[in-house]
Amino acid sequence: MNFTEQVKSLVTRGEVQEASANILEDTINAILGDPISTGKIMLAIAKSPFFVREQLFWTKLEAFLNGVYLNSDDCGKLRAKLTECGKKGDNSYRLVECIDRVETQQKIDYLINATRCLLTDLIDLSTYFRICHAVTHTLEEDLCFLRNHIKESNLPYDQFIQGLLSAGLMYQSVIDGNGDQKYSFTPIAEIVDQYAVSYDDVERYPNPTIRASQGEVPQISIPSMEWQSM
């Protein structure tokens, strides 16, 4: 039984009877693994059938919760991560905003991948939110381009390059006086690919838990600014 199925069971048994009076507060608590708050949101959405935006958000939130909360331990782990340093509201709100901004199921899957990596200490909280920001501010088509070309460098300009430049996932690596500029991926792009976009690609990234067991958390470095010229 997944997380929202457990919540539906609570609603059916009458343990959750009132709809949410504060959607934002209950959404934050739902992110932190509170089934009662999640049930209140479910009832509120059910009583507002004409609010398409709210229903779309619930669809994304439900998918996220089911992908992240595979057991009761996961609730405690994510709550601990998001509330470290006393930032319960800030970090939870940031995650809610990321979920709300994504426009495809695939991008929800990327957020789930990154969250699972956070729970297993493959990445730290700062890196996690960098990944979430990159996913939510990049078109799905551009993320697919990243996945297919991440091992390449000095790529020619096109519409995908422009989108990734705007998201901070590529930089101009070759300056040519004749206008033939080239572009390469930034270090954060490699992290986005490894822990979100291509996380399920075991051939590209085999045995990811080995890094966690050895205490190796990836560090983000700034790409060299020593530009090449043609």
Image (tube, rainbow, N blue to C red):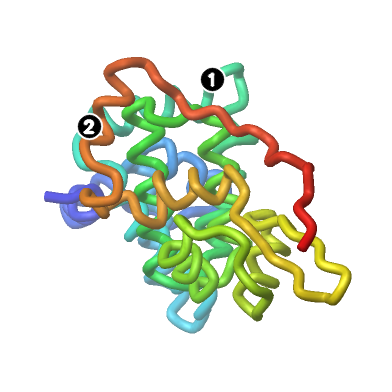
In terms of sequence position, does the residue under pointer 1 or pointer 2 come before the other?
A: 2
Whether residue 41 is visible to the viewer of this picture, yes or no, is: yes
Mark 1 lies on a secondary structure that is helix
170 vs 60, nearest the viewer? 170
Residue at screen point 59% across, 54% down:
185
Residue at screen point 72% across, 39% down:
224
Instruction: State the image coordinates of residue 161 (x, y, percent, origin top left).
Output: 64, 70
Q: Which residue is mark 2?
A: 72
Q: Disc 1 residue type?
A: Glu
Q: Disc 2 residue type?
A: Ser
Q: Is residue 170 above or below residue 70?
A: below
As drawn, the residue found furthest toward the right would be 177
Instruction: State the image coordinates of residue 145 (x, y, percent, origin top left).
Output: 49, 70
Q: Is residue 140 above or below residue 50?
A: above
As drawn, the residue found furthest toward the left would be 1
Q: Which residue is mark 1?
A: 84
